[in-house]
Image (cartoon, rainbow, N blue to C red):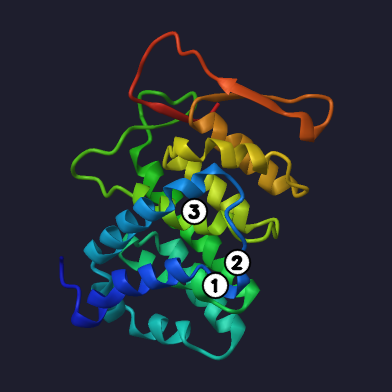
């Protein structure tokens, strides 16, 4: 398990208990059909988090880790933003803990932004250099870290109230990770009153191969499965 210490061995059990309780800060039921996938998705995330060398990150950046537990809100925000900018996948469980359990709403939102940055920066490493006219992400190889187990975290973020940011970050990650099971949820996000959420949902649907056609009103957007003329393992991030 690449250097995970004993105290991290409890992570899957703790996350499972939190998920079963379903009472994190009074969270509401999931907004769409992807709730059906929550249990297996959580197991996949638990295994993924357990496989990461988070202890290496802790030992390598003790000053940064100390800031994560600071009483000052701005200090904690700076810490999670720094982790996000680093793109360190081993730090994902630390950021996810803030996304799911941080009491301060502002810190929680910045943690969602940090997680999205880690995902996008790592996915863009597989940008196809042979398609310079648009951003195309190649599928992960056996040597690449597979971030798709973050689907469970996305489902938890979608269960939060629409603050104009959290759903946007979740939608962006869904698009980058090609999580098509969340297509119904993205359809719900198209009706958000927040333009940032709507844009992220549209972009995510397009990333995954859906056509989104705008009607006379933003709430009347319609989308349908794209009919590809040639099959390719690549997927366009944005045209």
> In this orientation, does residue 48 appear?
yes
Element type where label 1 sits in the image: helix
Left or right of 157 on screen, residue 229: left
Eye-nearest disc, 3 or 1 = 1
Question: Do tag 1 and tag 2 residues touch (Cβ < 8 Å)?
Answer: yes
> In this orientation, does residue 173 appear?
no
Vertical placement of residue 19 versus 184, above or below: below
The extreme bottom residue here reads 71
Q: Residue at x 77, y 29 (%)?
A: 220
Vertical placement of residue 4 versus 88, above or below: below
Residue 114 in the image, given as x and y percentages of width and height: 50, 62
Label ID, residue 27: 2
Element type where label 2 sits in the image: loop
The N terminus lies in quadrant:
bottom left
Element type where label 3 sits in the image: helix
Residue 109 in the image, given as x and y percentages of width and height: 60, 66
For the residues labelled 3 and 1, the Cα–Cα distance comes to: 15 Å
For the residues labelled 3 and 2, the Cα–Cα distance comes to: 14 Å
The mark tally for this picture is 3
The C terminus lies in quadrant:
top right
Quarter of the image for residue 39 reads: bottom left
Question: Do tag 3 and tag 1 residues touch (Cβ < 8 Å)?
Answer: no
**Frontmost residue, 38 versus 130:** 38
Per the image, the residue denoted by label 1 is: 24
Question: Do tag 3 and tag 2 residues touch (Cβ < 8 Å)?
Answer: no
Per the image, the residue denoted by label 3 is: 154
Q: Mark 3 Cα within 10 Å, few/some/many (few <14, many 20+)?
A: many
Mark 3 vs 1, N-terminal side: 1
């Amino acid at each position: 398990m690449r250097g995970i210490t004993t105290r991290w061995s409890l992570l899957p059990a703790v996350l499972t208990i939190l998920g079963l309780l379903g009472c994190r800060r009074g969270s509401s039921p999931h907004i769409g059909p992807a709730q059906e996938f929550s249990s297996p998705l959580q197991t996949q995330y638990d295994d993924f988090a357990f496989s990461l060398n988070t202890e290496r990150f802790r030992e390598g950046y003790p000053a940064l880790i100390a800031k994560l537990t600071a009483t000052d809100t701005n200090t904690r925000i700076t810490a999670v933003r720094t982790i996000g900018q680093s793109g360190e996948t081993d730090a994902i469980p630390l950021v996810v803990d803030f996304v799911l359990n941080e009491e301060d709403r502002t810190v929680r939102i910045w943690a969602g932004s940090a997680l999205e940055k880690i995902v996008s920066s790592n996915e863009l490493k597989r940008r196809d250099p042979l398609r310079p006219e648009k951003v195309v992400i190649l599928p992960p190889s056996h040597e690449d870290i597979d971030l798709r187990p973050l689907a469970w975290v996305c489902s938890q973020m979608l269960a939060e109230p629409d603050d104009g940011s959290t759903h946007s970050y979740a939608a962006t990650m869904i698009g980058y990770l090609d999580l098509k099971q969340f297509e119904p949820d993205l359809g719900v996000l198209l009706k958000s009153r927040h333009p940032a959420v709507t844009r992220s949902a549209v972009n995510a649907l397009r990333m995954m191969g859906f056509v989104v056609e705008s009607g006379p009103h933003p709430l009347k957007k319609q989308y349908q499965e794209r009919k590809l003329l040639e099959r390719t393992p690549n997927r366009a991030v944005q045209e």
